[in-house]
Image (cartoon, grey):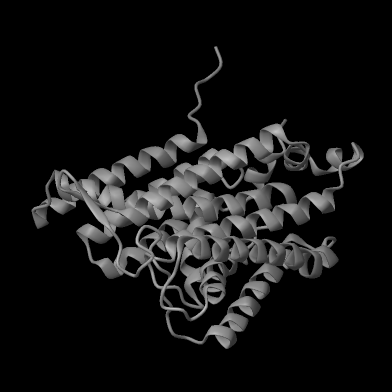
Amino acid sequence: MAPWRARPGWGLGGAAVLLAAALVLAGRRHGFGVPDYAQFVVDGLQAGAIYALVALGFVVVYRVTGVINFAQGAFVMLGPMLTITFLGASTTVSAPRLAASALAAVAATGALGVVVYRLALHPARGALLLTKIMITVGVYLVLQGTALLAWGPRPYVLPAFATLEMRDRSVLVGDVLIRAQSLWIWGTTAACLALLALFFERTLTGKAMRACAVNRLAAQLAGIRVDTMATLAFGLAAVLGAVAGIVVGPVTRPTFDMGLEVGLKGFVAAIMGGLVRFQGAIAGALILGVLETLWAGVTLAGFKDLFAFVVLVVLLLARPHGFAGAEAEAERP
């Protein structure tokens, strides 16, 4: 009989459950009850949905090109900032105008993702992997610096989708407060996941991208234009990042540097999910969102961002051989 081996994700899942239990017990000293924890979970799922969109961008690029794209955070920032620019300075906003501005921002960011690959990554396609990763870091810094020059350091306001104003609607479900923008975030994330599933399962382009993810050399020998698929992967990742930034924009006031935090947390979520599987990235994002919200609730709100980076350090220490295992898993038939 073959020896029983635990699946790689089980250790992470078990650690997440134990950490959640420890945080719940730690919250007892604050007198938290079931409604408080339910509120933490709802808020965490809202954050996790955003991280999921960003993490999917990391996974799409990594599976097709083998590159970790740290410019993903800049795409998250460009979504709301371009939407605000397209809306203009008018004090009244209509739903069609907001939708048209958001679509234009997503299209512009997607086109920028294509340009980034063709101008920055494609010329260096024969370079070492570390060189390509550093190029994406440089692209992020250039885009963030350009955003600072274009929009300045002040925060902007993107109206809530339900009210078209800064003030959002909210409903009480029992003792749990749910904001209307949270419903938009969950709905948008679910719609994006459904569209991605259709794209990769039902279209020739999606299947070609999947073939590149399984084995890039074999895909090339089969006549698939790997460079074209890589270009599309960057464009698709940019679209996902822009959508994430737009739906979270009304919750947090967009600034030129908002992409750093969201982008790194999306990266952590992608690593938690194994970096190569969409389902894993989604699960990792939701777990990260809930755990960091619980962490902030039982400690201090200012420690919320610290949690994700502690998780990142722990994960990197747990995987001293880097991401070679993930890539091998991606290329497994």
Indicate the position of residue 325 as horizontal and vertical percent values. 64, 44
Q: Is residue 304 above or below residue 291?
A: below
Indicate the position of residue 202 as horizontal and vertical percent values. 70, 32
Residue at the far top in the pictured view: 1
Tell me what residue is drawn at x 47 percent, y 86 percent: 153
Indicate the position of residue 29 as horizontal and vertical percent values. 10, 55
* Residue 241 seen from this side: yes
Indicate the position of residue 208 as horizontal and vertical percent values. 78, 39
Quadrant in the rendering for residue 76? bottom right
Q: Is 269 left or right of 302, judged from the image as shown?
A: right
Tell me what residue is drawn at x 83 percent, y 48 percent: 226
Q: Is residue 40 above or below residue 145?
A: above
Quarter containing the N terminus: top right
Tell me what residue is drawn at x 60 percent, y 54 percent: 58
Quarter containing the C terminus: top right
* Residue 277 seen from this side: no
